[in-house]
Image: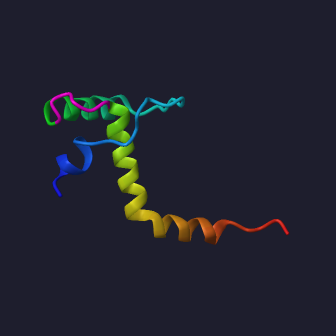
């Protein structure tokens, strides 16, 4: 699967959501340019970020879970 197929041609979000996030201005500019040029401005920024995060969690789920569980201690 190519980068475009994986990140820029589909998204599962149907709306923007109710949360705001802040990212570096340089990252916002890069992501916006990628969408404008590579994706022909056919995918919203929030959906692109959602695709990136979904991939991140899929790729690193085990490491994240292991690290979380190693630091999480039940109170009782």
- In the rendered structure, the answer to whether residue 17 lies left or right of residue 12 reads right
Residue at 26% of width from left, 46% of height from top? 7
Compared to residue 56, the image places residue 35 above or below, namely above
Q: Nearer the viewer, residue 56 or 13?
A: 13
- In the rendered structure, the answer to whether residue 22 lies left or right of residue 9 reads right
Color encoding of the figure: rainbow
Could you tell me residue 63's position as x and y percent?
47, 68
Q: How many marks?
A: 0
Could you tell me residue 25's position as x and y percent?
35, 28
Q: Nearer the viewer, residue 2 or 11?
A: 11
Q: Residue 66: within the magenta?
A: no
Q: Quadrant of residue 15?
A: top left
Could you tell me residue 32's position as x and y percent?
26, 29
Residue at 40% of width from left, 38% of height from top? 13
Quadrant of the drawing holding the C terminus = bottom right
Q: Quadrant of residue 27?
A: top left
Quadrant of the drawing holding the N terminus = bottom left
Q: Quadrant of residue 41?
A: top left
- In the rendered structure, the answer to whether residue 34 lies left or right of residue 26 reads left
The magenta stretch is 39-44
């Amino acid at each position: 699967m190519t980068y475009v197929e994986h990140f820029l041609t589909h998204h599962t979000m149907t709306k923007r959501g109710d949360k705001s996030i802040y990212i570096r201005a340089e990252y916002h500019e890069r992501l916006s340019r990628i969408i404008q040029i590579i994706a022909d401005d056919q995918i919203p920024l929030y959906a692109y970020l959602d695709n990136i995060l979904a991939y991140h969690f899929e790729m690193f789920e085990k490491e994240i879970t292991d690290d979380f569980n190693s630091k999480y201690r039940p109170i009782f």
